[in-house]
Image (cartoon, rainbow, N blue to C red):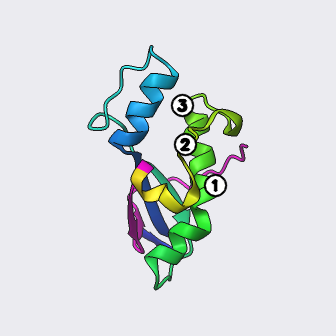
Amino acid sequence: MQLINRGFISVKPSSLFIEWLKSYDSTVLITAEDAEATVYLIEEEFWDDALILKTYAKKIATSTFAEYGCDEAHWPSNFDIENFEQWFDCDLGCTCIDLLAAPIQKESFN
């Protein structure tokens, strides 16, 4: 095992996001309880969760909406970064441990 020098934000779409998603795409069958979290690695040491979420909210929202096939032009009209935490359930932490011996591989995407 190895300690990785990163913190994390674990993000799941909230029930509000899922309700909107189903109105946007009626073929969606997922529920908030079934939604899988996405983990974003961030700086290892941080002291203010609200500041960290504010710093990364736009990137996380863009990634999550895109993951479900919605570009920014089609985001819900009542979504803004200020109400980010109503749309996404987030957990933050500062300990990441790699349980595998294989090296971590990185792949860029946009």
Residue under label 1, please give it: 59
- Quadrant of image for the N terminus: bottom left
Residue at 39% in and 34% down? 18
Q: Amino acid at mark 3?
A: Tyr
Dot label at residue 68 = 3
Residue under label 2, please give it: 64
User: In what element is the residue under mark 3?
Assistant: loop
Residue 102 percent location from the top left of the image: 51, 53
Dots 2, 1 in contact, CB < 8 A: no
Dots 2, 3 in contact, CB < 8 A: yes
Residue 16 or residue 38, whichever sits in front? 16
Magenta range is 87-110
Residue 89 percent location from the top left of the image: 37, 53
Give the answer, above or below, for where 11 lies relative to 98: above
Q: Amino acid at mark 2?
A: Thr
Q: Amino acid at mark 1?
A: Lys
Q: Residue furthest left?
A: 33
User: In what element is the residue under mark 1?
Assistant: helix
Residue at 56% in and 75% down? 43
Residue 19 percent location from the top left of the image: 38, 32
Mark 2 to mark 1 CA distance (whole Å): 9 Å
Left or right: 31, with 9 as reference point = left
Residue at 43% in and 58% down? 85
User: In what element is the residue under mark 2?
Assistant: helix
The question of residue 96 being in magenta is answered with yes
Residue 93 percent location from the top left of the image: 39, 71
Q: Which class describes the residues within 10 Å of circle 2: few (<14), some (14-19), or many (20+)?
A: some
Q: Which class describes the residues within 10 Å of circle 1: few (<14), some (14-19), or many (20+)?
A: few
Residue 2 visible from this viewpoint: yes
